[in-house]
Amino acid sequence: MSVAKSLPPVAVSGAGVSGLGAAWELTCAGHAVEVFEKSRGLSGRAASRSKEGCRYDHGANYFTIDSDELKELIFESLPTEDLIKVQGDIAVFDASGAISPGDPSQGTGEKWNYRGGINTIGKLMAESIGLVVHHQSRITGVRCDEENGQWFLQSMGEHEGRESLLEDGPFSHVVVSIPGPQSLTLIESSEFDEDLQEQLVSELEPIEYASQFSFLLHFVEDISFPEHTYALLNVDRGHDISWISYENGKEGRIPDGEHLLVVQMSPEWSFSHFDDDQETLQAGLFSALSNVMPNLPKTDWIDSQRWKFSLPQSEALEPRLASLGKEQGLWLTGDVFVGKGRVGGALERGLQLGRELAAWLED
C-alpha cells in the first residue's frame, strides 16, 4: 500500500491562492486533501464579483507570472481559454493629485487576469484536481492527538438547531493558510505541542496587516482616463487614495458604453474610517478623488468592500518557519511569507510548501 493511501488526508485551512497552491502540489503527488474555507468562494483576496452585467475585481487587480513554476501552472496545467492580458500602462500621482508617467522600468511586466474574474485562478485549480472544499467552515482551532499523531479541526457550526463546537478529522497534517493575525488567533486557540505553539506565537505576534477599502464606481457617461493607461498609483504614499484602475482594460468585463473604476484607499485612510457608515465613506471617497480626477460624471452605482487584513506591513517571515512544526504535522503558508500582497508570490509560496510537505510524507 502506498504512503498516500495509508494516511488520513491533509487539511488546509483557507482557500486563498497560497492554500490552494499547497493543495495542488499535494494532490498531484497523490495525497488526499480537504480544504476548509470560511467564505463561499475561492482565491481569498484575489476576489471578483458581478453587478448589473459588469464583472470586476474588488481585491487584487491582476497577477504577474515571474517564475518557471507559475508559467507551467498557468500556461500548461490550467485551461487558458479565459486567460487575458490587462491592457494599458501604470501611471503615477502624488500627494497633490498630480498625474505623471510611471517609471519606465517599473510596472512594465505583463499583467494577467481572466475574463471571468481574477478568482477564476482558484476555481480552475480546484476543478482541475477535483479538490474537496468545505465552504462556510471557519476553523477556530486545531487539536493534535499526541497519542497517534493525528489532527482535528475545530469550528463553530449549527448542530440540531443551535450553534455548537464541531470537530473534523482525523488528518495527518494541517496547513494553515490565512492572514497572519488570523493565524495567530487560530494557533493561540489550539491544542498541540506547547513549545511549538509558543515559538509560532512569538513569530506571528509582531506581524501587522493594513486594512483597505475598495470602491467600485460605475458610469454610463464617458470618463476621462489617461490614454493608454490602465491604472494610477500613488507613489509618495501621501494621498488618501492608493490606486485607481480602469476595469475596462480587462477584456470581456464591462459592457460597451459603460465604464467602471476601481478605487482603493490608502491603509491610513482605511484604518481611520473602517467603521464609518456608507454616507460618510462615500463623502470621503469623492473628496479624495476630486483632485486626481476632477471632472468625473455622476456615478450610476457604487459598490464597496472592506478588507480588514489586506496587505502585510511587516517583513516576510523566514521560510524555515513554514515547516517549523513538520515533526508534529503543522505547516504554515500565505503572503505572510512574501511580505507583500502579491497573488503570484503567495501562490508560488503555496506551491513550494506543498512540494516540501509531499516530500516529507514520502520520506
Image (cartoon, helix red, strand yellow):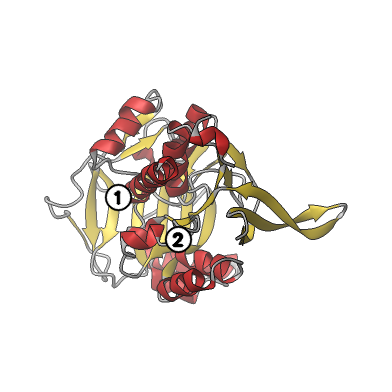
- Where residue 42 appears, as percent x and y from the top left, is 53, 43
Q: Is residue 95 visible?
A: yes
Nearest to viewer (mark 1 / mark 2): 2
Q: Which residue is mark 1?
A: 231
**Relative height, residue 67 to residue 199 (above, below):** above
**Quarter of the view holding residue 8:** top right
Q: What amino acid is found at the position of numbered circle 2 in the picture?
A: Gly
Instruction: Check whether the beta carbons of the residues at disc 1 and disc 2 lie within 8 A of each other.
Output: no
Local packing at callout 2 (Cα closer than 10 Å; few below 14, some 14-19, many 20+) is some
Q: Which residue is mark 2?
A: 325
Local packing at callout 1 (Cα closer than 10 Å; few below 14, some 14-19, many 20+) is many
- Where residue 39 appears, as percent x and y from the top left, is 61, 50
- Where residue 354 appears, as percent x and y from the top left, is 41, 44
- Where residue 5 appears, as percent x and y from the top left, is 55, 33
Q: How many marks?
A: 2
Quadrant of image for the C terminus: top left
Between 282 and 162, the one nearer to me in the picture = 162
Residue 173 as seen in the image, left or right of residue 338: right
**Quarter of the view holding residue 75:** top left
Identity of the residue drawn at 51% across and 35% down = 4
Between 267 and 322, the one nearer to me in the picture = 322
Between 41 and 113, the one nearer to me in the picture = 41
Earlier in the chain: of badge 1 and badge 2, it is: 1
Identity of the residue drawn at 42% across and 48% down = 18
Residue 3 as seen in the image, left or right of residue 87: right
Q: Is residue 117 visible?
A: no
**Relative height, residue 347 to residue 188 (above, below):** above
Secondary structure, mark 1, is strand
| The disc label shown at residue 252, or none | none
